[in-house]
Amino acid sequence: MQWIFADCYRKLHFFDIRSLNWRTASQRPSLRRLQWFGGVFLSIFAATCDSKVQAQGWPKDSTTLQPSKPDSLHPWLLEVPAHLARLVDKGKVRIEVNEAAVQAARRTAITEFSFQFQYHMRYRPVSSQKLSATDSPTKYSIRFFDTEWSFQHKISLSENYRPIKPWVSALLLHEFDHVAISTDPRLTAIIETFDDSQLIIEIQDTQDRRKLKAAIDQAVAEHVKKFQALIENLVKDKYKKLDEKSSNGLIPIGERGSFFHDLYSIETLRSEAFPYLDQVSEAIANVREASINQHYSTQ
């Protein structure tokens, strides 16, 4: 059997999903859990290649988020209530006054999110046949592992929005409902199924290892881009539903518990024709009802 080493522990690419500006980064090996996204192929990897890839991007036309400095922390975040502090922490929330952003959206406040995602991968030919001198299509098994990801949130406010008690302001609480949607434990469960998932691709083989590696890298990058877009579009769709239900935070949500419970339910995702539902249903079902209720708690 001939194995494709392709510079094990090699450098691969980071990409920004909006600009597709490529950067390089090193990798590290390890292995974990579940599988989905592609055909099922089980094997003992006697020799493989490990790589690390990171993707990040802001929806719409937002600029790349820069880490907040301690002296730039919005004063409201110094007195955030306990039940919202966990959202601030989990969602990496920053608040800023940005008149241009809210005017462009014709709102008093807006919430944007960034989905950052990185993983390792290893690959090998599915076929045990020796590569020939002539080009021929061969299937490759791609294994993803050691996935790391996070959401960051930016809440932009109008300079005229100055509530006396911000943490009882319906509008600010509405923006934190957005944060809760993109940090929902069921969404977390969906994303985590990518870890230890597997993809089967067919590549026109060649003895030119550089061309082969480039073809595999491109196929994997396209797969990951689709996965990231799937998650981002899912969250944006849920944001839209929240805005429609609450008239952009102007009116209370009727039957609040039912509304948020249904957002990521298996039944709702099935009605929305969510791809790979069979692969993620078990992970969603394993999320405890109590954790969902606590996540959306208002106190």
Image: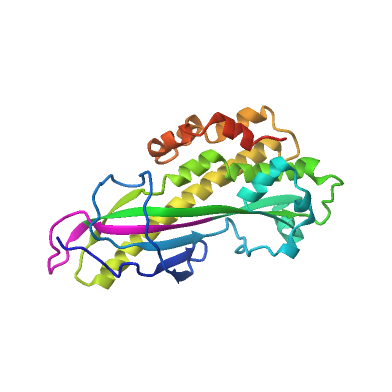
Q: Which residue is drawn at the image coordinates 43% and 62% (left, top)?
A: 53
Which residue reaches farthest right? 164
* Residue 120 part of the magenta segment: yes
Q: Is residue 298 left or right of residue 147?
A: right
Measuring from the top left, give residue 286's x and y in whole percent.
47, 33
> Which region of the structure is painted magenta?
116-138
Q: Is residue 124 above or below residue 197?
A: below
The quadrant in which the C terminus is found is top right
Q: Which color mode does the image show?
A: rainbow
Quarter of the view holding residue 139 = bottom left
For the image, the number of numbered tags is: 0
Q: Is residue 107 above or below residue 264?
A: below
* Residue 96 part of the magenta segment: no
Q: Nearer the viewer, residue 242 or 90?
A: 90
Quarter of the view holding residue 128 = bottom left
Q: Which residue is drawn at the image coordinates 53% and 31% (left, top)?
A: 288
Q: Is residue 280 left or right of residue 179?
A: left
Q: Is residue 130 left or right of residue 45?
A: left
Q: Is residue 66 visible?
A: yes
The quadrant in which the N terminus is found is bottom left
Measuring from the top left, give residue 282's x and y in whole percent.
42, 34
Measuring from the top left, give residue 66's x and y in whole percent.
63, 65
Q: Is residue 106 left or right of residue 161?
A: left
Q: Which residue is drawn at the image coordinates 48% and 60% (left, top)?
A: 55
Measuring from the top left, give residue 251's x and y in whole percent.
75, 35
Q: Is residue 107 visible?
A: no
Q: Is residue 293 above or below residue 109?
A: above
